[in-house]
Image: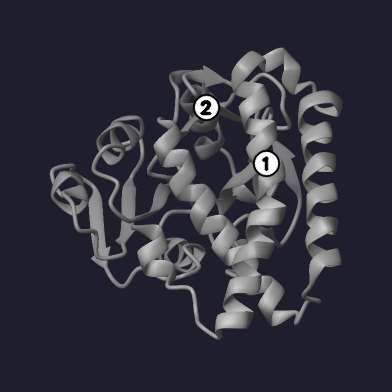
């Protein structure tokens, strides 16, 4: 008995990543479903060169997980492996997944946590709260769903969740400029969340965000041993702290100027 496995990917302007991502899975999976948010680069053209790939073009949603869930819903395999375009499945992880496809799904957990190695400033994190960075990415069809409410949510699973032993690789920040683009987008989303909550505005809330920044730096660099990651660990801890005041400043701007953040432009 061999169960089929599908890969679900959402993309937007991923021409620098999608080829390597697909090459890490196309030879051993049964199907790859890509939902593209109307990329302006060659993402779709590159993806269509691979066999087993089905591309669905739609709009680029403010909450990117909406397109991920569309890809998940379109998958036909008994098992679904959800990947981002900037992630890779190394041979050891592939070798661990394949035997699961030969077993009765009813005898296995509904889903699996997979550890992730994150690249930053040319360095794969060892600590900094960024490793093992577990995410639920392998699950049985119909038993996993994204809430589609925030940028950092996990898949909600109906049933038991176990662990795989091997890591997959995440190249989310190949350059510092790419990191700043994500930083800009995530702080914009955080500002919108503050606006929905009608959070207080003024000098003291901003001072509070400064204290939150210092606390976040302390957690990343000392408690999570970011110092073991050297200079990349320090930079990551510093900018993790800046999330709070930057999000608050954007929230202040939204409220006082009575305008909306254009997330599509932030994404570009």
- The answer to whether residue 80 is visible is no
Residue at disc 1, secondary structure: helix
Q: Where is 147 relative to 228, above or below?
A: below
Q: Residue furthest front?
A: 203
Residue at disc 2, secondary structure: strand
Q: Where is 181 relative to 225, above or below?
A: below
**Residue at 65% in and 72% down:** 252
**Residue at 80% in and 27% down:** 224
Q: Is residue 119 left or right of residue 8?
A: right
- Mark 2 and mark 1: Cα distance apart in space: 13 Å
Report the quarter where the C terminus lies: bottom left
- The answer to whether residue 264 is visible is yes
Q: Position of residue 46 (x, y in %)?
A: 16, 44
Q: Nearer the viewer, mark 2 or mark 1?
A: 1
**Residue at 44% in and 48% down:** 181
Q: Where is 185 relative to 250, above or below?
A: above
**Quarter occupied by residue 142:** bottom right
Identify the disc placed on residue 120: 2
Q: Nearer the viewer, residue 5 or 217?
A: 217
Asked if disc 2 and disc 1 are in contact, CB closer than 8 Å, the reply is no
**Quarter occupied by residue 240:** top right
Q: Disc 1 marks which residue?
A: 240
Q: Position of residue 178 (x, y in %)?
A: 41, 40
């Amino acid at each position: 008995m061999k169960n089929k496995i599908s890969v679900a990917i959402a993309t937007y302007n991923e021409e620098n990543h999608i080829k390597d991502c697909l090459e890490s899975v196309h030879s051993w999976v049964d199907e790859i479903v890509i939902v593209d948010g109307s990329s302006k680069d060659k993402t779709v053209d590159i993806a269509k060169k691979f066999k087993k790939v089905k591309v669905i073009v739609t709009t680029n949603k403010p909450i990117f997980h909406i397109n991920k869930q569309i890809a998940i819903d379109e998958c036909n395999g008994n098992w679904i492996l959800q990947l981002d375009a900037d992630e890779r499945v190394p041979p050891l992880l592939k070798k661990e997944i394949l035997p699961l496809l030969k077993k009765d799904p009813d005898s296995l957990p509904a889903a699996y946590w997979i550890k992730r190695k994150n690249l930053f400033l040319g360095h794969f994190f060892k600590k900094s709260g960024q490793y093992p960075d577990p995410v639920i990415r392998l699950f049985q069809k119909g038993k996993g769903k994204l809430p589609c409410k925030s940028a950092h949510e996990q898949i909600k699973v109906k049933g038991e969740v176990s662990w795989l032993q091997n890591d997959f690789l995440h190249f989310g920040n190949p350059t510092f400029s790419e990191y700043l683009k994500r930083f800009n987008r995530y702080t914009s989303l955080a500002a919108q969340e503050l606006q929905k909550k009608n959070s207080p505005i003024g000098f003291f809330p901003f001072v509070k965000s400064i204290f939150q920044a210092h606390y976040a730096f302390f957690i990343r660099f000392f408690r999570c041993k970011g110092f073991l990651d050297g200079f990349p660990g320090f930079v990551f801890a510093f900018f993790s702290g800046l999330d709070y005041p930057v999000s608050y400043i954007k929230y202040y701007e939204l409220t006082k100027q009575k305008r909306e953040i254009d997330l599509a432009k932030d994404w570009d």
